[in-house]
Image (cartoon, rainbow, N blue to C red):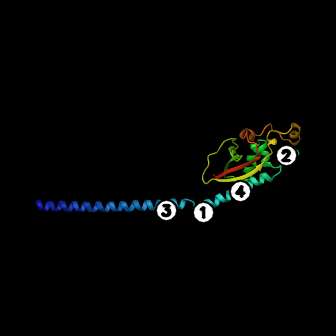
Amino acid sequence: MRSENRLNGKNMLQHFLDDHGQMMTLEVVFFATTVILSLVFIYNLSPPSVVTNKYSSNLKIMGDDALRSLYTQPIIGVPPKGYPNSRLVHYLITNDYGDLVSDLNDLLPSNVMYNIYVSNGTNTMVWCNSQGGIGQVLPVVDPVTVSHYVVSIDPSYLTGFSEEMYMDAGIYVDRSDLCYMFGDYDGSVYDVMLEMWYT
């Protein structure tokens, strides 16, 4: 009788272990399936790098075109003799942050945000951002694309013309912020950088 009980107990234990082993095997299979499906789902949601590179390339072209367009567009009104007839240069000389941002917002897609920097080749300073924040940097979202446009500005324009010359052209400026940013810079070349990303 005792040996029968032992055998029954042993069989029950063996049966329990077999069931437990089967359950563990099923759990492992279920877990592995869940992980594989999750990875496939995440991969399908992630844009491929080719698409990202295409977006970045297209955005760079749009940024380059926008800066070039601003540079080649003449200023409104009659400029003083010798004054650079370029909206981009005019905006830098006269600290016209609002019109610069407004024009760029018209030239770029509405879902593009940007920061504008100006560099003299040694130092790079924040000019403004797409929301009009002067000297403020918006947090960027990858991928980020940067466009450049190099301009030349006669240093005498940065400290102001005679009052009559400015009045005749409807230009009012005391001193360009470039003077404050690059006070000891005696050159005339500036790199306007447009750091852009999609929202």
Which mark's residue is nearer the viewer, 3 or 4? 4
**On the image, numbered disc 3 is attached to which residue?**
40
Q: In this view, does 193 lie to the left or right of 8?
A: right
Indicate which disc, 3 or 1, sits on the residue closer to the N terminus.
3
Q: What residue type is labelled 4?
A: Met
Name the spot of residue 20 as percent of width and height, x first.
Answer: 29, 60
Query: How many C-alpha atoms fall within 10 Å of the one at disc 1: few (<14), some, or many (≥20)?
Result: few
Q: In this view, does 58 lie to the left or right of 47?
A: right
Rendered view: 183 above or below 149: above
Name the spot of residue 135 as percent of width and height, x first.
Answer: 68, 41
Rendered view: 85 above or below 164: below
Could you tell me which residue is drawn at 18 percent across and 59 percent down?
Answer: 9
Which mark's residue is nearer the viewer, 3 or 1? 1
CA separation, marks 4 and 2? 28 Å
**On the image, numbered disc 2 is attached to which residue?**
83
Is the N terminus in the top left, top right, bottom left or bottom right quadrant?
A: bottom left
**On the image, numbered disc 4 is attached to which residue?**
62
Dots 3, 2 in contact, CB < 8 A: no
In terms of secondary structure, where does tag 4 sit? helix
| Residue 50: mark | 1
Could you tell me which residue is drawn at 45 percent across and 62 percent down?
Answer: 36
